[in-house]
Image (cartoon, helix red, strand yellow):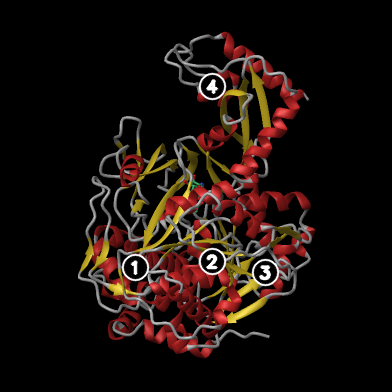
């Protein structure tokens, strides 16, 4: 059985506090009673007059440069120190941190821990098959990464190239990400649930010449033919020259001249791979996410700032300490998997769980059986899974020993009070703080969360509450004025840059500026609305644009409409998100058929589902398709989605201003059609 490597834990802690040790000890002596800022965060001993969490937060925003400079020096290993802490101008959408500095992200995540504690476990691969977990030490993960790095180099992948990774959450996927970082290539991880077309679109936009995948995926006891999906995708991707295929199962799959078996090729390579010295602002990865209009955006994150922010938030929001086992169950295809399964925990020398399965496989006790077996300390999951598990009853949780748990995290969408209470009371036995963490692909890491806080500070159910260090949220009214009072709601913006934020949209800096910096000049606009309570705590109220969130998966309604409109029978459509008891939001499509179409509505619904599943992913399929003769439109021809949303929410008393509506009868038809659909 694996035991946490406490010996080295001390060693790492000692090396982290090098350089501040004298002042650190002094501060410890000076401030023995109450909350000790220096013990909490060694860097803070250098911050004049700071005691207490709130003072530390104030300092982090009022002296942002000295705060981040101290943290970056302390927590990252640099090949060359940086010259400039930041050079940002939000009004121009220009963001740059730690210029002049050189480092290698894989060295920060691997080599420095191998030097101190090679046998510490880096990854616990919780395979789909329950009870068959596999552990990888830091030494093993470094060797795997080096072999992969050498292989990519031998095959011509260069600094500045972008490798697409289409794999389930598994050690070779992590090693692939780190191998890219080692040789200076960017990675583009595509969620392995995406269809061939969605994958192809992302490969093309990233201009990848190399794809890494697996022969088959295994999830919830089901096999998915991932290699076959890649084959279908690369047919329309002329840039792809080579595909590496890892063997997750025994099954042989069709291979062409362009395909290589990953494990076989890795065996030919050396276990030492020279890391490329990277500039702080070189690209680390692209990650595609949905916006309200147009195609998915390839958000770009760079080296130093991203890694620092992922590591720092991981350490402080979850109270992660050496020797802990961190269990983030998000897929690596999402930003949560990047920041809190891979980069944050590994930069901190942590042990991180790679969860390949589902919350209900082989039964609804899966998470908690895993917590017991792996002795997980921090568990980080999504509200949609919590809501699903509530339905199966408390016995599935109580069957297992959860005494190892210290912190429970939630991410991806608002967590309703019932789910929060259950998570806290049943899963955490009332012992573990529940941290509702708000952030986005764009923010790189957690921006608002109840922790860190003073030890006895309150946590309000269903609220993200407190801005993280260096984060300065503001709420805007509809005129673009900053709302200064409490007990108020507005558009959530950030008034200051922070190291983890995205730098651009790949190939489209203009869209980056227009989406995030033009709506409120001088501020970063999140697209979310928020409420600030009497006490100054933040609660996220949801998206302000046409982006919906299905089981924590972000998708633009425009993307789904795009696919629906491709159906030859469809004249036009409007897709709306509606509140769904488990998924958070479900997809509801209004569809107008072309004149003279003589196909059964049920058949068209089926066809639309197949199309969405084929072109995007299963989760984006409409739960309801309502056929209508026409859609409510303004006189200028814009579909009034606001009205459709109210109809779907059965909130007919607040349809709002209908004065711009072209033909009021259209709304009545829609209401009738909706009632009919519900009564079916
Ligand atoms: C990390 C992640 C981002 C959007 C975001 C917001 C919603 C995420 C939330 C939350 C309420 C929370 N969101 N966390 N809403 N409370 N704790 O999910 O990134 O996939 O980019 O989605 O998700 O609407 O804007 P991403």
Among all residues in the image, which is located at the extreme left?
83
- Which disc is residue 129 wearing? none
Tell me if the residue at label 4 has its CB under 8 Å from ligand 1: no
Rendered position, 660 above or below 207 = above
Label 3 and label 1: CA atoms lie apart by 32 Å
Of label 3 and label 1, which has the lower sequence position? 3
How far is disc 4 from disc 1 in space, using C-alphas?
Answer: 45 Å
Image x and y of residue 381, in percent: 60, 58
Q: Mark 4 points at which residue?
A: 643
Which mark is first along the chain, 2 or 1? 1
Label located before the other in sequence (4 or 1) = 1
How far, Cα to Cα, is label 1 from label 2? 18 Å
- The answer for how far apart the CA atoms under marks 2 and 3 are is 20 Å
Residue depth check, mark 4 versus mark 1: number of the one nearer the observer: 1
The residue nearer to you, when weighing 99 against 235, is 235
* Snapshot quadrant of residue 678: top right
The secondary element bearing badge 2 is classed as helix
Residue 664 point in image, percent of width and height: 54, 9
- The residue labelled by disc 3 is 248
Query: Which mark sits nearer the N-terminus, 2 or 3?
Result: 3
Q: How many marks?
A: 4
Q: For the point 32% across and 68% down, which residue is it?
A: 51
* Whole-number angstrom distance, CA of label 3 to CA of label 4: 48 Å
C-alpha separation, residue under disc 2 versus residue under disc 4:
40 Å
Residue 478 found in image quarter: top left
Disc 1 marks which residue?
304
Camera-near label (3 vs 1) is 3
Q: Residue at 27% of width from left, 63% of height from top?
A: 97
């Amino acid at each position: 059985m694996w035991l946490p490597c406490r010996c080295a834990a001390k060693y790492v802690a000692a090396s982290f506090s090098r350089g501040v040790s004298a002042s650190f000890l002094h501060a410890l002596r000076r401030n023995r009673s109450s909350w000790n800022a220096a013990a909490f965060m060694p860097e803070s001993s250098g911050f004049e007059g700071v005691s207490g969490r709130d003072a530390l937060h104030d300092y982090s925003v009022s002296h942002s440069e000295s705060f981040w400079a101290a943290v970056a020096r302390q927590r990252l290993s640099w090949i060359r120190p940086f010259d400039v802490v930041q050079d940002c101008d939000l009004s121009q959408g220009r963001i740059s941190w730690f210029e002049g500095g050189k480092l290698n992200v894989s060295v920060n995540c691997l080599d420095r821990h191998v030097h101190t504690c090679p046998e510490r476990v880096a990854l616990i691969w919780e395979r789909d098959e329950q009870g068959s977990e596999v552990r990888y030490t830091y030494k093993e993960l470094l060797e795997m990464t080096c072999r992969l790095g050498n292989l990519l180099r031998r095959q011509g992948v260069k600094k500045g190239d972008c490798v697409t990774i289409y794999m389930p959450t598994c050690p070779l996927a992590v090693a692939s990400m780190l191998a890219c970082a080692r040789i200076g290539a960017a990675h583009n991880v595509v969620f392995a649930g995406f269809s061939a077309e969605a994958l192809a679109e992302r490969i093309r936009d990233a201009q990848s010449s190399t794809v890494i995948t697996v022969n088959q995926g295994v999830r919830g006891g089901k096999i998915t033919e991932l290699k076959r999906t890649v084959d279908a995708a690369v047919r329309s991707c002329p840039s792809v020259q080579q595909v590496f295929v890892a063997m997750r199962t025994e099954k042989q799959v069709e291979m062409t001249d362009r395909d290589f078996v990953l494990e076989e090729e890795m065996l030919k390579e050396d276990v030492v791979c020279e890391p490329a010295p990277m500039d702080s602002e070189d690209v680390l990865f692209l990650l595609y996410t949905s916006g309200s209009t147009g195609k998915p955006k390839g958000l770009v994150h760079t080296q130093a700032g991203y890694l620092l922010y992922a590591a720092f938030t991981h350490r402080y929001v979850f109270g992660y300490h050496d020797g802990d086992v961190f269990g983030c169950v998000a897929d690596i295809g999402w930003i949560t998997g990047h920041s809190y399964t891979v980069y944050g925990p590994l930069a901190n020398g942590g042990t991180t769980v790679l969860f390949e399965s589902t919350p209900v496989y082989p039964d609804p006790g899966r998470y908690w059986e895993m917590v017991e077996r792996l002795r997980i300390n921090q568990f980080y999951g999504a509200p949609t899974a919590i809501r699903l598990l509530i339905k199966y009853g408390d016995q599935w949780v109580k069957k297992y020993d959860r005494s190892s748990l210290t912190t429970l995290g939630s991410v991806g969408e608002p967590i309703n009070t019932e789910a929060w209470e259950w998570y806290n009371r049943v899963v955490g036995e009332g012992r573990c703080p529940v941290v509702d963490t708000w952030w986005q692909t764009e923010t790189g890491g957690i921006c608002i969360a109840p922790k860190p806080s003073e030890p006895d500070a309150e946590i309000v159910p269903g609220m993200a509450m407190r801005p993280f260090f260096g984060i300065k949220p503001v709420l805007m009214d509809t005129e673009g004025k900053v709302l200064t009072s409490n007990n108020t709601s507005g558009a959530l913006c950030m008034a200051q840059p922070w190291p983890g934020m995205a730098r651009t949209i790949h190939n489209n800096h203009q869209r980056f500026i227009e989406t995030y910096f033009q709506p409120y000049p001088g501020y970063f606009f999140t697209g979310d609305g928020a409420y600030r309570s009497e006490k100054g705590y933040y609660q996220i109220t949801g998206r302000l644009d046409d982006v919906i969130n299905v089981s924590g998966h972000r998708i633009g309604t425009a993307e789904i409409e795009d696919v629906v409109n491709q159906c030859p029978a469809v004249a036009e459509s409007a897709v709306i998100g509606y509140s769904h008891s488990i998924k958070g939001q479900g997809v509801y499509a209004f569809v107008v058929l072309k004149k003279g179409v003589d196909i059964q509505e049920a058949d068209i619904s089926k066809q639309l589902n197949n199309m969405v599943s084929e072109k995007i992913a299963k989760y984006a399929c409409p739960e309801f398709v309502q056929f209508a003769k026409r859609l409510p439109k303004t006189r200028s021809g814009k579909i009034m989605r606001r009205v459709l949303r109210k109809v779907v929410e059965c909130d007919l008393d607040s349809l709002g201003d209908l004065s711009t509506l072209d033909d009021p009868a259209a709304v009545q038809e829609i209401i009738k059609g909706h009632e009919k659909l519900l009564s079916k």
